[in-house]
Image (cartoon, rainbow, N blue to C red):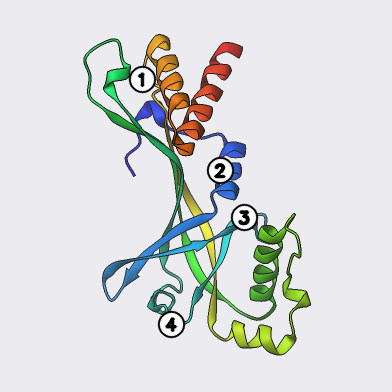
Amino acid sequence: MYIHPKNIWTKEADLIKFIQQNAFATLVSRVTNRPWATHLPLILEKDQDGHPILLGHLAKANAQWKEIENEEVLAIFQGPHAYISSSWYNHENVPTWNYQAIHVYGTCRIIEGEHLMHHLKTIVDKYEDGRPNRVSVEKMSDSYVQGQVKALVGIEIKVSEVQASAKLSQNRDQVNFKNIILKLQESPLPMDHQVASEMEKILNADGEG
């Protein structure tokens, strides 16, 4: 994706946290020579060699898995985003949009057996954690689990490249930057508040420097 030099995002710890917190991704590949996208949760882990991988699963009825083995795919992780009105500036300008996004490229392979079961247990445990009456794969009957597994295709993506953009008005002077934060904080939209919070982190980091 295009990333303005001011918006390049490289801090590994922040990227890992972002992917973990925004794990519902868009998986893009080609099916019958056309772009194809599936929306699904992906779990970031490391393989036995310490290399980063993404684990997920598709419905067997989804044609995407049939053309994904050993192919390069793109996983898109989208975070908070907000419209930025140019009426908030102290000078003439155009409106824009602030956002955070990570694109992860990698080679995909199909996983089965214990590898797939590990993924299914991990993802259920992750999202059931802290919930009342939490469920787990281990508590489900074996016959039921096996029946469900037959309808799934597990995938593992070995990460080869990460592109990350945090477009958060870094091109604005401090007066306008702070005013954008204030206007976002006044918004009734929860996501506007999330973007304001991310911008405050930049402000605080600059202050520490």
State the image coordinates of residue 59 (x, y, percent, origin top left): 48, 77
- 34 is higher (above) or lower (below) than 105: below
Q: 65 or 98: nearer the eye?
A: 98
Q: Residue beneath label 4, please?
A: 61
First in residue order: circle 1 vs circle 3: 3
Q: Residue beneath label 3, please?
A: 51
Q: Which corner quadrant holds the N terminus?
A: top left
State the image coordinates of residue 177 (x, y, percent, origin top left): 41, 17
Query: Hey, which quadrant is residue 105 in on the image?
Result: bottom left
Q: Please identify, in this view, whether the residue under mark 1 or under mark 3 is nearer the observer.
A: 1
Residue type, label 2? Phe
Q: How far apart are labels 1 and 3 at the CA level?
A: 35 Å
Answer yes or no: is residue 154 visible: yes
Q: Which corner quadrant holds the C terminus?
A: top right
Label disc, if present, on residue 171 of the rendered structure: 1
Q: Secondary structure at mark 4?
A: loop
Q: Please identify, in this view, whether the residue under mark 4 or under mark 3 is nearer the observer.
A: 4
Left or right: residue 197 compared with residue 105? right
Q: 143 or 134: nearer the eye?
A: 134
Residue type, label 3? His
State the image coordinates of residue 160 (x, y, percent, origin top left): 49, 54
Q: Secondary structure at mark 3?
A: loop
Left or right: residue 35 compared with residue 205? left
Q: Residue beneath label 2, please?
A: 18
Q: 195 or 111: nearer the eye?
A: 195
